[in-house]
Amino acid sequence: VQLQASGGGLVQAGGSARLSCAASVNYFDTYTVAWFRQTPGKEREFVALINWSGELTYYSDSVKGRFTISRVNTNNTAYLEMNNPRPEDTAVYYCAADTQSWRVATMRSVNDYALWGQGTQVTVSS
């Protein structure tokens, strides 16, 4: 397993939660990392991404201002801090990674990422 997502569970609306993505790859600090989410019957959708250094981050409009993506390269781990979650944020959350770094701003498709974690369920209760 190269990416391991964790930290999901039951979260109260308006609370907070932090998801972790632990990577067992060499040169983690060369990877772009992203979070996606998926609900039953729907396609996996982009949530956030972070470039190799952590200096560039991008978010979907639905989570901008509430979620924060970050990474600690010395720990080979990326995070998704979910603040003020809403019931509509309920989904299985997946972390993904890829060595592409030259078009980070446009990497919002599942096809842009070669590595995927197994997913972690987040349920936001109202």
Image (cartoon, grey):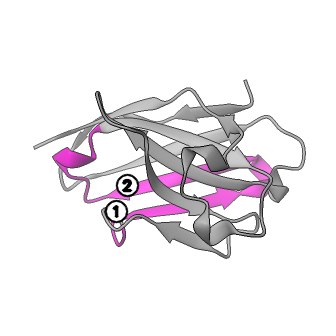
Query: How far from the left and from the top, in percent, is residue 55?
Result: 67, 76
Quadrant holding the N terminus? top right
The residues colored magenta run 64-90
Label 2, secondary structure: give it. Answer: strand
- In the figure, is residue 21 to the left or right of 46? right
Please report the residue visible at 33 percent of the width from the left and 66 percent of the height from the top: 66
Dots 2 and 1: beta carbons under 8 Å?
yes
Q: Amino acid at mark 1?
A: Val
Looking at the image, which is closer to me, 66 or 45?
45
Mark 2 closeness class: few <14, some 14–19, many ≥20 residues within 10 Å: many
Residue, x 65% and y 50% (percent of image)?
A: 112
Which residue corresponds to mark 2? 82
Q: Is residue 65 found left or right of 75 in the rendered image? A: left
- Sequence-earlier tag: 2 or 1: 1
| Residue sitting at the far right | 26
The x, y position of residue 95, in whole percent, is 57, 42
